[in-house]
Structures are given as C-alpha cells and as structure tokens.
Amino acid sequence: MLELAQARVGDVAPDADLLAMAVSFNLIRAADRLARDLEDLHRPAGWTWPGFRIVFWIWLLGPLEPRQIASLASASRASISSALKTLERDGFVDRDRDSNDGRLVTVTLTDAGRNLIGGSFRSHNEREQEWVAVFTIEERETLARLLGKLLDHVPPRLCD
C-alpha cells in the first residue's frame, strides 16, 4: 500500500519527501490500529478508550481541570467535555465547581473510577506489551525516545 502511494505521489510531486511521507503514513496507521484495539479492550469494562485516557491522567496526576485533561490527552475541549459527561453519568468521575468562580471545574475520580482503573490498567499494559513484543528492549527504548522527540517538536504552521 505504501509503495503504491509513494509511486502515485512521485508522479504528481516528484520533489516530495517520500521518506517523510512513509514515516507519517505508517505512524498514523499504527496509531489508528492501536487505538481501535485498545477501544475493543476497554469496551467490556464499560468505558471507551478516550474515557480510559481521561481517568488514567486523573489517576496519575490527581484532580485536573478539563482544559488540562484536553492538553494531556491531545484532544479538543469539546471531546473531553462529552467524555466527562459520560464518565460522570457512569459514576467514574465527579466534576466540582470552584466556589469562588463557577466557571472553574476540577475533575476527580470516584471510588468506582479508582477501582476500575486498577484492573483496567493491568489488562491495558498487558496489551501494550503484546503490541511491542515485536521489538527488542533496545528498539523499544529507541522508539519511545524518537516518538517523544517527535511529540516535543511543533513544526511551524504553513498558513497562520
């Protein structure tokens, strides 16, 4: 598939950086496939992959504001708000409004949220291990470092 895409792109854009395209193409495909797999893993527990990510960040860092969660999860505030509504309805999180400024909301885990994240994280990490089993320890370290470097890099926008 990648070879076909590279050949077609080469026809219309001979100066295209096909290696950059290959990295982006494969990274997006791998991320999408992994996300779908993790979604399937978390559904039986009663929540979605985005829901797991939100609860994980709160479990890891403690109470957070929705804007902080959105930043950590690389998601829009609107999608976080929607997911929080579901998580709150299902009893996994509480949203508390600041008594001085009602616009400020802090999200905390309920006992049910804390209980579910423990078991869910174990099965989640087992699945992560299965995904990266194809790599040696050194390759895992290199890939983690390189992906971290990519995430720290913010290329300038072409049209601001």
Image (cartoon, grey):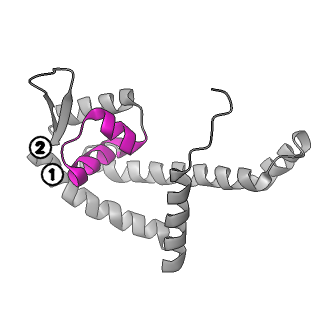
Mark 2 crowd level (few <14, some 14–19, many ≥20, 10 Å Cα): some
Q: CA distance from mark 2 to mark 1?
A: 6 Å
Task: Give the percent coordinates (x, y) of residue 94.
Answer: 14, 35
- Which residue appears at 56% of the width and 63% of the height? 146
Residue type highlighted by circle 2? Thr
Q: Quadrant of residue 87?
A: top left
- Is 79 on the left-hand or right-hand side of 95? right
- Which residue appears at 54% of the width and 67% of the height? 143
Q: Are marks 2 and 1 in contact (CB under 8 Å)?
A: yes
Number of marks in picture: 2
Residue, disc 2: 110
Q: Give the structural element (helix, strand or loop) at label 2.
A: loop
Give the residues in magenta.
49-74
Task: Give the percent coordinates (x, y) of residue 6.
Answer: 81, 50
Residue 136 in view of the camera = no
Residue type highlighted by circle 1? Arg
Q: Give the structural element (helix, strand or loop) at label 1.
A: helix
Q: Is residue 12 magenta?
A: no
Q: Nearer the viewer, residue 156 or 56?
A: 156
Residue, disc 1: 114
Magenta stretch, main secondary structure class:
helix
